[in-house]
Structures are given as C-alpha cells and as structure tokens.
Amino acid sequence: LAIYDTMNHIKAPIETICVGQAASMAAILLSAGAKNKRFTLPNSRILIHQVIGEITGQATDIKIHADEILRTKERLNKILARHTGKSLSQIQKDVERDKFMTPEEAKKYGIVDKVMK
C-alpha cells in the first residue's frame, strides 16, 4: 500500500501501463492510475483475487494475523471498487477466487481505460 499511497500523494496525474501481467496488488495499482491514463498492452493479462497469507504459531497469534488479513482484504476491496466503479459487493464476489482478465475484459471491468495497439 506504500506505492498506492505515494501515487495518491503525487499531484501530477499518474499513468499506468500493464506490460505482460498485472496480478494481485499490481492490478490494484494499475486501476489506481489517473482516469484515461490507465493502459494495457494487447497481450497482457490481469488477475484480481483475495488477499493471501500464511500464518503459523500460537492460536492467539493466528487470530491476530487472521484479523489483520481480513482488515487488509476489506481495505483493498474498497480501493478496487473506488477505481473501477464496481460495487463493493461485486468486488467481494469477484475476488473470492482468482479472476483472470484479458485486456478487453479489464477495460470493461474498469481496471484500464484503453488497450494499446
């Protein structure tokens, strides 16, 4: 989220371009570019999914980490909803499993604005 915060802090419009693949947090950063400045190359792919984490240790520590993962999941879902124009409930449904998108699907979804030729 440090890169996302930096993108929001910069006053100049941020242009994002997917070259090859934007998966997970990279897809969120791709969507966070300035409107009409979010691009993908025609043979790229975009992947969104829920937060992934591994936890080991004592039961109380596992709960602490699980709660933090859920908090992060909610934060990232809200960010993706804000930048795509999708409802939070739609994002929650879509990220429940891996969702791969072609450039055209990512444009329709609201992650990018244009597929470069």
Image (spheres, rainbow, N blue to C red):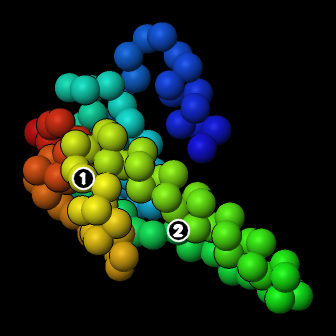
Residue drawn at x 58%, y 67% is: 70
Amino acid type at circle 2 is Val
Residue drawn at x 11%, y 50% is: 108
Quarter location, residue 46? bottom left
Crowding at mark 1 (Cα within 10 Å: few <14, some 14-19, many 20+): some
Q: Secondary structure at mark 2?
A: loop
Q: Position of residue 44 (x, y in %)?
A: 26, 56
Q: Earlier in the sequence, mark 1 or mark 2?
A: 2
Q: In the displayed structure, does residue 18 sit left or right of residue 63?
A: left
- Picture disc at residue 40: none
Viewer-proximal residue, 44 or 100?
Answer: 100
Residue at the spot of label 1 = 87
Q: Secondary structure at mark 1?
A: loop
Q: Position of residue 77 (x, y in %)?
A: 41, 55
Q: Quadrant of the C terminus?
A: top left
Amino acid type at circle 1 is Ser
**Residue 39 in view of the camera:** yes
Q: Position of residue 23 (x, y in %)?
A: 41, 60
- Picture disc at residue 51: 2
Position of 8 relative to 11 (above/below): below
Find the distance from the CA under tag 1 to the CA under tag 2: 18 Å
